[in-house]
Structures are given as structure tokens and as C-alpha cells.
Amino acid sequence: MISAREFQNMISIWDNLTPFIEGYTYQVVRAGRYYTDQVTSSAVITPSDSALIAELGFEFAAAQISKPSAADSEVINKVYLSLQGLPGFKAARPDMNAELLNEAHSIGNNLVTYLKKSKRVSYIFHPIVPGCGVVDETRADIIGNGEIIEVKAVRRTFQSMDLRQLLTYACMSVASGNEVDTLTLLNPRLGTKFSSSLSDVCYNISGSNSVDLMYNIQRAMQDIQVSV
């Protein structure tokens, strides 16, 4: 078996199935558009702290949606435990300074702003996406009534690899019998988003309709030869 991340990085497969993805990303997806004017601070933050803040912001948003009574300390401890053992992550610190905490809350609030503006009935954080072919099951960021959301709380524009990640999740979800109609990239740190129907994305990156492209990606997942 291979991971979803490994599959989305198999560029030769994507070049064959989605020959226009780079141009589409550059012209349409990259900059996204602003959905809120509440951007986070421009404070200089180390890469390790940036990853921590992004994860904290995501979990603060999840807590606002599913457990509003959760204390900051509860969310912080959960995130530290989940990040332990990851390469480059420092040992848990007992303190969280105000600047980092404010940045994380800003990210979480911006994420919740998008979800509350949406007409979707409900959202699930960290949903399991069933495996397909040799691609093992994984977890998406957020799924809600046909919309798959990938959260990128970073200080960069959206990239084609982000779109490939969404398409990988969409294919795996469709293959398991779920309905997917919308793909969304969300950057709550910059307050930007890219959101489009699955059918429009598929046509613009491949020239095919969504049914055909999802089928072709699914076949690729099934046909990959994995070394044992």
C-alpha cells in the first residue's frame, strides 16, 4: 500500500491525466480570493512555531464548532500530543506566549468565519477517507455535505500540489460511494480561498468531465505496481 501523499506526488500520472493543471493553477487557483478582511498578524515566526500555530488554529476552529466549552489548555495539550515524534518538532513547552496564541486564535476564527458563511448543513473535522486500489485510507481536513476542504494556513499562495491533494481525496471519496460536488482550498492565515465545483475543476485541468476523470484517477490507483 502507499499513502495518499505518495500518490499525489506521482507527477507522471498527473501529467498524463491532468495536462492543464499547472496552467489552471497559475491563472485561476494560485491567488484565490479574500473571504475575510481579518488577516492574521505579520509577526516574524519561526518555521517550527508556524507549523504549531497552524495546527492550533485548526483545532481551535474544530473546538468552536464541536466543543465550544473547550479551554485553550485542553486544545494546546491535544496538539502537542499529536505532534510529538514528528521530525523537527521540539519537545512540548509548558508555556505558550500571547503572540503565538493570538495568531492561532486568529487562524481558528478565520476558519470558522468561512464555515459559518457556508450554506452547508454540517462539517466534519479530520474525516476518514476510505482507501482506493493500493492507496491507503487517510484523513482529510474537513468534509461537509459534498464539499472537501483542504486547509493551508501558510504564508504562500496555493499550488498545484494542493489541488492534486484535493483531487486525490475526491477520487477516493467518490470511489467509496460518497458524493463530492465542491473542492475548496482555504488559507485562514491570509484570509483567502479557492472554491469551485468538481466538474469545473476536472474540465479545466483535463478537458474531461468529472465522472471520466474520477474514473481514470481511480484506475491509476488500482493499476500502480507497488514493490514489496
Image: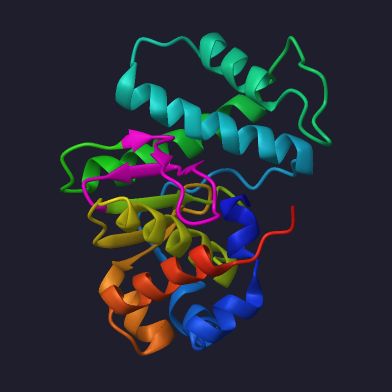
Q: Quadrant of residue 174?
A: bottom left
Could you say where residue 16 lies in the image, as x and y percent from the top left?
A: 55, 85
Left or right of 205? Residue 157 is: right
Q: Nearer the viewer, residue 147 or 223?
A: 223
- Look at the image and tell me whether residue 159 can be seen: no
Q: Residue at x 59, y 43 (%)?
A: 41
The correct choice, above or below, for 144 with respect to 211 in the image is above
- Residue ranking furthest to the front: 228
Q: Residue at x 49, y 34 (%)?
A: 58
Left or right of 206? Residue 52 is: right
Q: Residue at x 58, y 83 (%)?
A: 15
Q: Nearer the viewer, residue 19 or 102?
A: 19
Range covered by the magenta-colored residues = 124-146
Is 134 contained in the magenta span? yes
The correct choice, above or below, for 19 with respect to 115 in the image is below
Question: Mostly what secondary structure, the magenta segment?
Answer: loop
Display coloring:
rainbow
Q: Residue at x 25, y 51 (%)?
A: 178
Could you say where residue 146 lies in the image, as x and y percent from the top left?
A: 24, 52
Number of numbered markers: 0
Is 21 contained in the magenta span? no
Could you say where residue 150 lies in the image, as x and y percent from the top left?
A: 45, 51
The correct choice, above or below, for 173 with respect to 44 in the image is below
Q: Quadrant of residue 141?
A: top left
Q: Nearer the viewer, residue 100 or 152?
A: 152
- Look at the image and tell me whether residue 20 can be seen: yes
Could you say where residue 107 lies in the image, as x and y percent from the top left?
A: 49, 39
Q: Nearer the viewer, residue 182 or 187?
A: 182
